[in-house]
Image: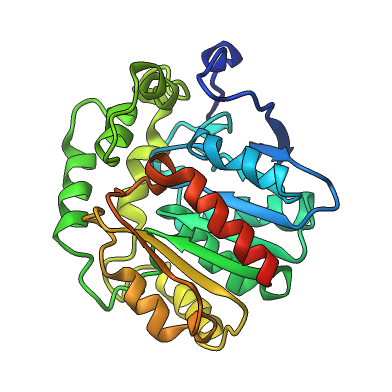
Amino acid sequence: MEILRTPDERFADLPGWPYESRHAEVGDGLRMAYVDEGPRDGTPVLLLHGEPSWSYLYRSMIGPLADAGLRAIAPDLIGFGRSDKPAAREDYSYADHMRWLTALVVDVLDLRGAVLFGQDWGGLLGLRLAAEQEERFAAIVASNTFLPTGDRPLGEGFEQWRAFSQQVPEFPTGAIVNGGTTRDLTPAEIAAYDAPFPDESYKSGARQFPTLVPASPQDPAVPANRAAWEVLRRWEKPFVCAFGDRDPVTRGADRVLRELIPGAAGQPHVTLEGVGHFSQEDAGPRLAEIVIATAASA
């Protein structure tokens, strides 16, 4: 496996980002980066990003969570941020991402009593992780995400996004994030989302992610996702949805989660008005408040 590593100087002087990254070996010779802020004995909050962002997405949430006495942990998925990036698209699969993330959470950090916050692929991975490591998680907050098993159409918004991601000659990571928000990111913020990718050769993981979303029952990830749903259908710990009302990709997915997961009953679910797909950019401080309240109730 050819592994690319983004030069550190690409991450110098990013706006609103005072955090130092730590690194852990997660298998296959790969190094995963993560931010770990707040008291070591605080309730862990695992903040999982999606496509094509990185932990920079959580810059307005990490501080408030740490100030509230929580331990905020924001990894960069393999292929993103300051984490290593396999150069070949075939080196990425749903199962691989799960294996790498599990190695960090279980083998390196040994998280227990954690609160999961997952958005986009942060939910596709995080919901699986919480189900497979049920005893390690005390609560879940889901934002603009879902856990597909190929039984439902993924929707026109997702289909358009997947086609674009595979056909566009140059994958414009920063512009994609900006296009998924309702506020306009500054040029410096857009550049921060471009920082992990010096050129197209670093974007294999970002290119591959949209093709890994299970679109049919025959997808290789479906059996594990179905098994995760068996756990989630009996999940009685707090499960809170905080979805943006301006996200064309995951609109309506919160209804499925709320109907099928017992722990969602009676929870203070929120529809975030005027919030797009990247809810952390449009409503980060509000999401931090929701996570803090959820952690207190767990």
In the foreground, 178 or 23? 178
Say how the picture is coloured. rainbow
| Vertical arrangement, residue 98 with respect to residue 190, above or below | below
Instruction: Identify the residue at image location x=64%, y=38%.
Output: 63
Instruction: Identify the residue at image location x=37%, y=18%.
Output: 199
Where is residue 117 shown, x and y percent of the image? 55, 57
Q: Is residue 105 left or right of residue 227?
A: right
Query: Can residue 95 be seen from the camera position used here?
Result: no
Q: Total label count?
A: 0
| Vertical arrangement, residue 52 with respect to residue 109, above or below | above
Where is residue 150 shown, x and y percent of the image? 30, 73
Q: Is residue 198 left or right of residue 155?
A: right
Residue reaching furthest to the right:
41
Query: Can residue 153 be seen from the camera position used here?
Result: yes
Instruction: Identify the residue at image location x=71%, y=42%.
Output: 67
In the foreground, 184 or 74? 184
The quadrant of the picture occupied by the N terminus is: top right
Where is residue 182 shown, x and y percent of the image? 26, 40
The quadrant of the picture occupied by the C terminus is: bottom right
In the foreground, 86 or 70? 70
Instruction: Identify the residue at image location x=49%, y=37%.
Output: 54
Q: Quadrant of residue 139?
A: bottom right
Where is residue 229 shown, x and y percent of the image? 48, 80
In the foreground, 27 or 150? 150
